[in-house]
Image (spheres, rainbow, N blue to C red):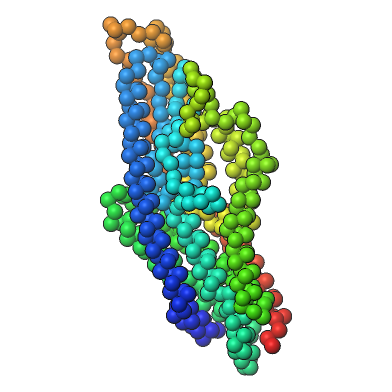
Amino acid sequence: MWLIIKKRILLNIFSLRFIILTILLVVCISIGTLVLLGRYQMEKELYEAAEDRAATVRYYARMYGQLHLYLNRPVEQLSLISTGYTDEFGSSIKIPGEFAGRMSITKYSSHYSLSPLFGYLDLGKIIAVLISFIAIIITYDSVTGQKENRTLSLCFSHSLARYKVILGEYLGAILTLIIPLLMSFIILELILVSSRKIDLNAEDFLRLNFSFLLSVVFISVFALLGVSISYLFHSSANSLSLLLLLWIVLLLIIPNFSSYIAERYHPIPEIEKPIIGEGSEKPPANLWDMLYINEKVQQYNVRNSLSFLSPFMAYQSGLESLSNTSLPSYLKFIRQAQNLNETFALWQAEKLKTSPRRLMYWSTGDEPLDTSGIPHVEYKKSSLLASLTESLKGLVILISWNVILLLLSLYNFNRYDLR
């Protein structure tokens, strides 16, 4: 079996198709990282501007009924890997307390869209699309190619167990695929370390390393898929055609169809969309009501419940958790804002006990508004352990895909006609 693994690795790494696709992956990761670093810097500046705005609002407030806070979510440094839900609705929540209206969320950033099919651009999508395509290209003829060359039957002229051929082809493919994947992550980390736009800590690098391990499990699915389909046909062209069709279905059709199912199963009434700002007939395009967000979250939950149908969806879900850009992390952000709003309302009530006239009245002779003891505003990021626990769902789905494909491959190849 080790000879089969060695043979497959050597055939792959010295093939022109593998070399070209590896270069393409490395170039795309390099360019993509530089582009996304520019986006990160822009969003970081917008976040700092939002923080300054919040401080200005507090400084110039003269009445407790006028005073409100803002909870601004910092730009996640690993949103380069997976944008997730970081800015699906917004990253700045108005904390109105008891008197300044309703809670609302405002966007202060925007992502670059890759396409209507893939959505927002991030490195996780680039890796998923290209590395899965490479997996298909190097495995589609792993068995049929040998049969066309009439060398497959020679492998079994000696007492060689069939399962060893499948395992050898699979392990050879996965070890080959780790090479471009590892190169991509090394280049990514080198660019991030050398950049002045971003400052990663030890936890961020751990998250990156876990993302690499998750990527290995993901590409293993397509390596097994390629080997499994390869022996179903007598022609490599037919094998490649079916694999490309499955690749399109798993990466494009199922994720987009899941979104369609979620929208049909849990439609959102038009009236619950962006709120109308007070005193205006038309709301800002980036202002969202909490009612609409709650409905949209339910819609996303329906979509995410279908993630087991596609390894791509499971992989993206895992990356979102490791990058702290998942839907649960966004909901945690909203819960923090809700808790802060309750605390802020209690603080207002206490202040009004001693200064009731400052609710909605102020004159030039009044002293500055007493804001001592005002609730501290700070976003609390999920811990690494919490992110790892959250990513287990995607990991379990990917492992299940691997186990099912491996068992099917071993079972069917035992019945395969070697002639």
- Residue at the spot x=40%, y=60% of the render? 29
Q: Is residue 60 left or right of residue 206?
A: left
Residue depicted at x 54% and y 30%: 274
Q: Position of residue 361 (x, y in %)?
A: 38, 8
Residue drawn at the location 64% of the way across and 51% of the way down: 257
Question: What is the x, y in percent for residue 231?
Answer: 65, 78
User: For residue 149, which quarter of the picture?
Assistant: bottom right
- Pick the quarter of the image with the C terminus: bottom right
As drawn, is 281 to the left or to the right of 39? right
Q: Depth check: 249 or 93 in front?
A: 249
Residue located 37% across and 52% down the image: 35
Furthest-bottom residue in this view: 157
Residue 366 against residue 331 in the figure, above or below? above
Figure disc tally:
0
Q: Can residue 71 be seen in this view?
A: yes
Image position of 40 with respect to 192: above or below:
above
Q: Nearer the viewer, residue 287 or 373?
A: 287
Q: Is residue 402 visible?
A: no
- Residue 308: x percent and y percent? 63, 55
Residue 363 location in percent, x, y?
32, 6
Quarter occupied by the N terminus = bottom right
- Of residues 38 and 65, the one nearer the viewer is 38
In depth, the one of 330 and 92 nearer the eye is 92
Q: Is residue 286 left or right of residue 293?
A: left
